[in-house]
Image (cartoon, helix red, strand yellow):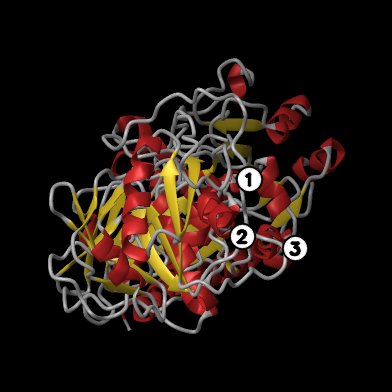
Amino acid sequence: MGLFRRKRRADDGVGSDAGREARGASVASDRPLRVTGWDGALPHLDVPVTVVVTTRSDRHAEVPRLVAAVLDAFGADADVRAVSYVADASPRDGFAAALPWVRHDAVDGIGSAVNAGVLAGVGRTLVVVDTSIDIGPDALRALAHDVGRPTQAVARTADGAARGGARLIRPGALPWSDDRAAPKDDPVFGADQPVVSMPQRAVVPAPCLPDERTTLTAWTVDAAASAHTAVDARDVGPVVRTVEPGRTVDAAVADVVASWRHRTRTPTGGLGAGLVAGSPLPPWGLRPVAPTARARADGERLTWAVKIAAPAGPEGDDWGDVHFAAELGAALGRLGQRVRIDRRDAHVRDDDATDDVTLVVRGLDRVPPNPASVNLLWVISHPDDVADTELRSFDRSFAAGAAWVAARSERAGVPVEVLLQATDPAVFHPGAAHGADAGRVVFVGSTRGTARPIVADAVALGADLRVHGPGWQDVVPAPMRGAGSLARPEVASSYASARVVLNDHWPDMAAGGFVSNRVFDVLASGGVVVTDAVAGLAEVLDVPTLRVARDRAALAELLDPAYPWPDVAERAVVAAQVAAEHSFDARARVLLDAALAERARLHG
């Protein structure tokens, strides 16, 4: 999905559903105030009920209707307060003087409206109802009667669909809004509609998030936790949601949802253990879910979708991601797994509810997790493009750089595990050392549209260099240019026969300790490799067939034909070690164990 493609740019922001409530341009230039909570203890008032009427700033005409219903329900002296909030850049109506406004300006979002509404204190029961809700006095009394825990009224939409509370049927994913016609008596995870009551002792500040449903769910979950209870959905009679807001998902919303990954799932009344996921919500790609009855895979034979950044068709066929995924997929297949490779156009599929595991091999593109499956993230390149929120969105995260893992695990607040890149010993193994590149210095790769200093230095030194790959016509002299592309067996032959193979890294990968898979491929081929400096390289690969050139002088020494590289027998020992410890088979076993453990946690 191009929506989630990122090429070294910032990715924070907000988006919303199309086809929902229209967004108008704000007529006010001043920024609405965010009200995040209160100082000290919230005053507890000696009144039976406090009702906070929240209204989007362009729906002030609906406030009198709700205030009248509150006064009818609880008497002329009822403690009722109205608060206006801006959402989706909504225009701002005037404030009718006769209404019980808390303040004569709008605050930022429904969470701020709840907080502003209760700042003066709350009675023994708090009721919050929004002007998008049509509710009468009898239903209000029923919602406020005998409230021992946060409670949402079961609502119907304008077209008759039910809204019976948020159910966490897949921890770490957007909750499902229970749409079954018959209300259930069992607790829900949280509220999904702005028609809520709770006891005085449970009132806590509401989070200030741009997504209404996540705000309400998070608020009522926190309120229930503070009161050591659960959240209920109650059928109080006719309650209609006259308009449904669009969803707005930013990094803060994604982080709140990710924080629920270890919560207990709420019951769904035997609707089945399977899930279907809707379209991703930009820009963070969270996907709404709904339960479905389908059989899950048994045992260790799972269906995997390996997501890579390469585009479909010939344009992407030569990407390194394609070869990486193919060799990893073959290794998973040898472990009895069913594997499909999804390129950029298939990051989200209509049938992806059938996937047991989604493995994102993270290169250029951020891919939304699939809440219908276990989600694993393996960062193998461009680590600076990976946001902390992205790491927190996956069930398990791995990365191929130890230094980066240590720093980001601490910063993101979630464990990231080291999983180095790998090689396929079936392709890269010691072979005949008399190919076309025998005795030469070799580099295999494209220009990447930028300078590659180790190649430029080798050219400047007059090395007996041969460069294979696209884009070198105007970069290296013609006698040093080899083939525009090589098949995998040809690459392996070149590595095995070359006198020295050159390697380099993107600066962020070098700093993070991301050792290129080219290094593993060369070593497994029985070749020798000279690379630029990489953080922690000696701790990963302390072998005599790998050396670091920190400057041109060091490179000159290593490229000298007289340099004493290990002999064929010593190289074969290194190749066997690399094949045993750094094969795709070894990596596949780690990933399968992680997938099985997460599947047991999610479905146990």
Looking at this view, name the residue that lies furthest to the front. 76
Q: Which residue is mark 3?
A: 538
Q: Residue at x 39, y 70 (%)?
A: 171
| Residue 274's disc number | none
Q: Earlier in the sequence, mark 1 or mark 2?
A: 2
Expressed as whole percent of the image width and height from the top left, the position of residue 592 reads 39, 73
Q: What amino acid does circle 1 point to?
A: Asp
Q: Can residue 422 be seen in this snapshot?
A: no
- Tell me the amino acid under the disc marked 2: Ala
When the figure is inspected, residue 241 is found, relative to residue 145, above or below; the finding is above
Residue topped by disc 2: 120
Residue 313 image offset from top left, x and y in percent: 29, 33
Report the residue at 49% width, 47% height from top: 100
Position of 431 relative to 95 (above/below): below
Crowd band around label 3 with a 10 angstrom C-alpha radius: few (<14), some (14–19), many (20+): few
Name the image quarter holding residue 229.
bottom left
Counting residues from the N terminus, which is met first, the one under dot 3 or under dot 2?
2
Q: Nearer the viewer, residue 514 or 244?
A: 244
The crowd level at tag 1 (other Cα within 10 Å; few <14, some 14-19, many 20+) is few
Q: Nearer the viewer, residue 130 or 211?
A: 130
For the residues carrying marks 3 and 2, which lies nearer the camera in this image? 2
Q: In terms of secondary structure, where does tag 3 sit?
A: helix
